[in-house]
Image: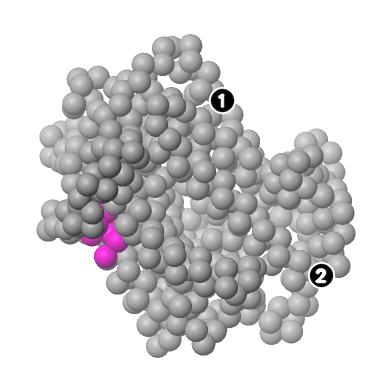
Amino acid sequence: MAESKTVHSPIVTYASMLSLLSFCPPFVILLWYTMVHADGSISQTWLYLREHGLQGFVNMWPKPTFTACKIIFCYGAFEAALQLLLPGKRVEGPISPTGNRPVYKANGMQAYFVTLITYLGLWWFGIFNPAIVYDHLGEIYSTLIVGSFIFCIFLYIKGHVAPSSSDSGSCGNFIIDFYWGMELYPRIGKNFDIKVFTNCRFGMMSWAVLALTYCIKQYEMYGKVADSMLVNTILMVVYVTKFFWWEAGYWNTMDIAHDRAGFYICWGCLVWVPSVYTSPGMYLVNHPVHLGIQLSLYILVAGILCIYINYDCDRQRQEFRRTNGKGLVWGKPPSKIQASYTTTSGESKTSLLLTSGWWGLSRHFHYVPEILAAFFWTVPALFNHFLPYFYVIFLTILLVDRAKRDDDRCRSKYGKYWKTYCDKVPYRIIPGIY
């Protein structure tokens, strides 16, 4: 199994897996409770728990409700229907380790616009009030925690009983199989790709939907939307719009092309993204900050610039691959390395590694503007509380770890060619520093 060759020592790997499996679900509830009911103050939540003990935590944890189930089911069914029914261009993913090439229907942008227009339309015409989603947020997260665990068990069983392709298999360890996943490209039938649904159409889509939800809730509470909330919402929505514009490129990344469908990816996209990724907006609902026009514009422009650079990095590499290294990079012929590798089936293949443009600055330079963009949509919350910045810190740790895993995977795949590449592009993320 691809991921059983862990990049950390076995003890660190087991410790991190078991701690994430056991600590992530309660953390989501603690985050929601602190943001919504404890004024965003960690110390306030801590005092409550110290006073009431374990029973206090049990009382804090909302029970899954029928309303929450109904909201999640309607949203999930709507997104699944859009994924299946909307027209889209046929796109091929990268060749997998066993030599398979997955085929997708690229209709993410259409699904995104239909979703946002429908959601805002339901609010505008008084059919459904998005504030209801915010009011039931704790129950929704609680239901997602339970439902997503069940879904991950389904994926584990499916990987054993009915894998969708030869890119599957067990490493013989239940915890690793459940955590990292059994299948690389699980599908229901021929056309419904489970990872596209969990990662893109449920997870990333919910980010934009909840960003708008928080904005509408603040409007309902105060009769206006604070400039801090507007900056936060605009930047998050611009970022998610960029994601769906580039969705076909995302299908070439580690999340889809290398990480199997298990707890790490699927539970993360179904629960962690709607809760942790949207948390700065969740905080701002009850904490309207007045930034003033000048500061708002500075933050907005800086955030949009970071999102654009992040997009341009990905676009540059995608264009380089599409033209087989023949296009221009920053107005010049690209500097590149031709690397040979062998698939698990023994077939020889070649790849081109780009060593100029953004990709000449560092091997994962695109992570720098991504982290900065997250900072800019969080900074409207100012610095009264630490918790709104949890996502920025989490994202930094996630991307540093992902850069290491990607480097290790490429080292084992390309061998001497990767060493040549690292000599040419010596920095991993931050040029001149790391």
> Where is the C terminus found, in terms of image quarters?
top right
Q: Is residue 36 above or below residue 91?
A: above
Q: Please tell me whether mark 1 sits on a helix, a strand or a loop.
A: helix
Q: Which residue is mark 1?
A: 302
Residue 125 position, x and y percent, is 15, 33
**Magenta: predominant secondary structure element?**
helix
- The structure's colour scheme is one colour
Specify start and end residues of the magenta stretch as a single range. Answer: 141-146
Residue 204 appearing in the image: yes
Residue 256 position, x and y percent, is 53, 63
Which residue is more in the foreground, 82 or 423? 423
Residue 417 position, x and y percent, is 84, 64
Q: Is residue 34 above or below residue 318?
A: above
Q: Which residue is mark 2?
A: 415
Say whether disc 1 or disc 2 marks the residue closer to the N-terminus: 1
The residue sitting at 28% across, 33% down in the picture is 39
**Would you say the residues marked 1 and 2 are in contact, meaning their CB atoms lie under 8 Å apart?**
no
The residue sitting at 71% across, 55% down in the picture is 321
Q: Is residue 212 left or right of residue 420?
A: left
C-alpha span from label 1 to label 2: 39 Å
Instruction: Look at label 2 and name its amino acid.
Output: Gly
The reply to whether the magenta stretch includes residue 145 is yes
Instruction: Look at label 1 and name its amino acid.
Output: Ala
Which residue is more in the foreground, 413 or 117? 413
Residue 122 appearing in the image: no
Q: Is residue 108 left or right of residue 79?
A: right
Residue 195 position, x and y percent, is 44, 64
Q: Please tell me whether mark 2 sits on a helix, a strand or a loop.
A: loop
Few, some or many residues within 10 Å of mark 1 (<14, 14–19, 20+): some
